[in-house]
Amino acid sequence: MPALTAAVLGAFVAYAAAWYFGAVEGNFALLLLMATVVTGLYWLAERFYFLPQRRAAAAALDAQAQARGEELQRLGIAAPPAAETEQAKHKLLMQPWWLDWTAGLFPVILVVFVLRSFLFEPFKIPSGSMIPTLLVGDLILVNKYTYGLRLPVLNTKITEGTPPQRGDVMVFRYPPKPSLDYIKRVVGVPGDEVAYLNKRLTINGQPVPESALPEFFDEDAMRYFPQFEETLGEKKHRIIVDPDRPAMIQGASDFKYRQNCRYSVEGVVCKVPPGHYFMMGDNRDNSLDSRYWGFVPEENIVGKAFFVWMSFSKLNRIGSFQ
């Protein structure tokens, strides 16, 4: 068993190293599931086989020591100190390293697996596409049950939950490459006609309410951008635009249901198909979103982003957001 355990742990380390150095495309959900299963099997083996064996050996040692003490006492010889027997029992009962690194870690790994798969998952904001709502490097929490619980790895929905609403900030698997997680704002739900023309958002023929705010200073770009408060449904949030960027959408790919979209020099108009969502970043001119790669299918949904739990740039940003 020690050799087998060393091989199993070595395989996990090798996979993690290959993922880190870009040799393989990693899947953390799958890695965590495998770690839970493997350590769970070791925990069961420890609970029902290895631990009872060690306890039986310790009990046998106790009985042997007692019999020997009685025999020495009969012969008038002083029995050995009890501490020697207790030390030997401790060694027998002690968990070996290969169980300590597997069965011993199972409760912690199980808790992490359950929390991450069904309740909350942490994410780090990798880009500026959601500025000013979320900044690069913000550490956020994503609610995994609001939109319905899903099986880990398979991402199959097992409870209905509440459908995403316009204005929600949602994490989803990037349609062109599902191994990547993206975060954007839900702008269009199934059946909506979303138009983004001349940098003004319209949904089902109704302009989305927008009011001007003081300019936003982007510390990374070292410049000011026009900032607005936009209202989607009952949710108010801030957006920024770059007046130097053209309204025309350049470089849109050939995505599924592309026939639902009409591109022009003014922007784009799209009809959201059933079971899909139209996503946009709050940094409207610096966001690779549905305008470029299409709609997000319902099965790609990961969860609803709702809380910044750490922001190293500005601690006062910690808290919930819309």
Image (tube, grey):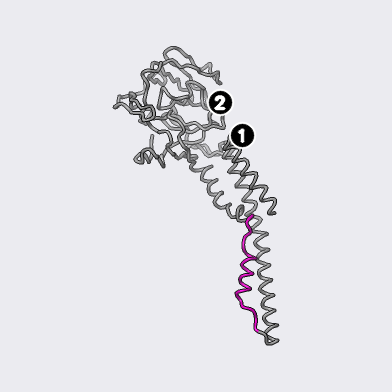
Answer few, some or many: residues within 10 Å of disc 2's Cα (few below 14, many 20 plus, some between 14 and 19): few
Is 276 placed above or below 149 here? Answer: above
Among all residues in the image, which is located at the extreme top?
Answer: 265
Q: Secondary structure at mark 2?
A: loop
Answer few, some or many: residues within 10 Å of disc 1's Cα (few below 14, many 20 plus, some between 14 and 19): few
Cα separation between marks 2 and 1: 20 Å
Magenta range is 78-98
Is 305 placed above or below 60 here? Answer: above
Q: Label 2 amino acid? A: Pro
Residue designated by label 2? 176
Q: In front here: 166 or 17?
A: 17
Residue designated by label 1? 23
Q: In x, y percent, where is residue 158?
A: 56, 39
Is 57 displayed left or right of 249 in the figure? Answer: right
Q: In x, y percent, where is residue 106?
A: 58, 52
**The C terminus lies in which quarter of the figure?**
top left
Q: Label 1 amino acid? A: Ala
Query: Is residue 212 among what the camera can see?
Result: yes
Q: In x, y percent, where is residue 259?
A: 53, 16
Residue at 66% over, 47% down: 8
Residue at 43% over, 24% down: 286
Is 138 displayed left or right of 256 in the figure? Answer: left
- Occupied quadrant, residue 280: top left
Q: In x, y percent, where is residue 153?
A: 59, 38
First-in-chain label (2 vs 1)? 1
Is 124 placed above or below 189 here? Answer: below
Q: In front here: 195 or 246?
A: 246
Report the disc number at residue 210.
none
Mostly what secondary structure, the magenta segment? helix
Residue at 46% over, 26% down: 279
**The N terminus lies in which quarter of the figure?**
bottom right
